[in-house]
Image (tube, rainbow, N blue to C red):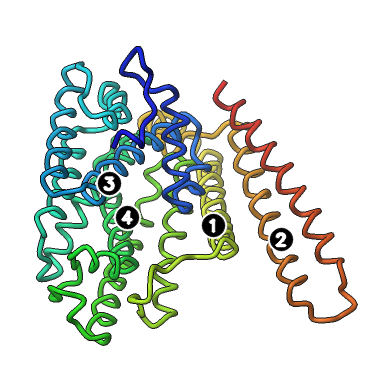
Amino acid sequence: MSDRFEMRNDADKWIDPIKDSKGVIARSSRSFTLASSFLPYPTRTKVWALYAWCRSVDDAVDHAESPIEAAEALRTLEEDLARCQRGESPAHPASEWIRPLIVAGHIEPRHARELIEGMRMDLDGYSVGNNEDLERYCYHAAGTVGLMMTSLMGVTDRSAYRHAVALGVAMQMTNIARDVREDAERGRSYLPGITNVLDANSDQISQGVAKILALAEERYNVAIEGLHYLPWRCRVAIRVALEVYREIGREIQRKEYSVMGGRTIISKVRLALVAARALLSSTRNNIAMTLRSVMDRILFPLKEFSMSESSDSNPSVRPCTANQAKQVAYLGLSLTAIMATALFILVYINPKEEAYSYLPLVYAGASAIVAVFFNRLSAYYDRSSVS
């Protein structure tokens, strides 16, 4: 793991933990990188750190040279959780990412331990015989991440936990459907009832993938029902992540569940379209919630005190600042301009009329400039909201 971490020579500290964790998520996941850009900056840096740690735990198994090395890395990572709780320096460099989150009480260490247990299930060759086995594995591998993410976003209402777990499980099921071939090459199978994917016929694999994606769809719907527990900007970010990940499953469905040809990847244009649609949907819902709140205050002034009291205890109804609203609005406009740029380029490549000439390319250039401009404005107001 040493080549994945840049350390000081004089101390066991990161040179720049925020920048480093941002690099991990940028290299590993376009979906989560895009979604995290909608989070408030303080929450975003914590999410980057948590993602980097989770990625390292996963890599400890997938990239180890031997099962013995993988088991030793997991043992060290698990022992580091206790060291962090005691205020001691961790032994594994990746634990530096999660240490401040544990020390500050932003996450529960037991959820991190359950995630490590999920990686041990991979290492031990966990057998998925039925849907219950699948659910158990998905909880450890990703439902735990949903719980830690919810805590990072400041949600304390335990009623939200069921929805957080549902989203993590749904995303993991989507991962399983997408990575059937890669898992099979590692000697793993998470399709219920199929012990060895390489020995199964294409119909069996397609049916197994279809069932998993149907289960994932049910859990995505449960997750959506619980978005109101989140603070409004986190709600936007999670809705974007949910819809972008959901699109992977829908693309697999469009391909008639043919997954053995390789990993399904969503194009950047489609990614932008799905994210924009999710952003519009979330924004519409946020506006509706705000209007309901305003109307309640106008029509039922006697509830003023009780409502203000509940808003202090529930972050999901806290009003946003003007700078926060501008940041999200400009980010949405930037995303729309990126979509326009991609569409103009497509028109240039496949013109309907010869008369188009270079005009779509000019429009594409103008849209790209507008996208950069709005992106810079978004970044400016994001910094202003922190200060």
Q: Position of residue 310 (x, y in %)?
A: 38, 33
Closest to the observer, 82 or 200: 200
Q: Quadrant of the C terminus?
A: top right
According to the picture, the residue beneath numbered tag 3 turns out to be 59
Number of residue marks: 4
Q: Are marks 3 and 4 in contact (CB under 8 Å)?
A: no
Q: Is residue 212 left or right of residue 286?
A: left
Q: Secondary structure at mark 1?
A: helix
Disc nearer the start of the sequence (3/4): 3
Q: CA distance from mark 4 to mark 1?
A: 17 Å
Q: Is residue 87 left or right of residue 206?
A: left
Disc nearer the start of the sequence (3/2): 3
Residue at the spot 20% in from the left edge and 44% down from the top edge: 115
Q: Position of residue 117 (x, y in %)?
A: 13, 46
Residue 167 disc label: 4
According to the picture, the residue beneath numbered tag 2 turns out to be 340
Q: CA distance from mark 1 to mark 2?
A: 14 Å
Residue at the spot 18% in from the left edge and 34% down from the top edge: 77
Badge 1 density bin: few <14, some 14–19, many ≥20, Cα 10 Å: many
Q: Is residue 297 left or right of residue 208?
A: right
The residue type indicated by label 2 comes to Ala
Q: Position of residue 308 (x, y in %)?
A: 44, 30
Residue 191 disc label: none
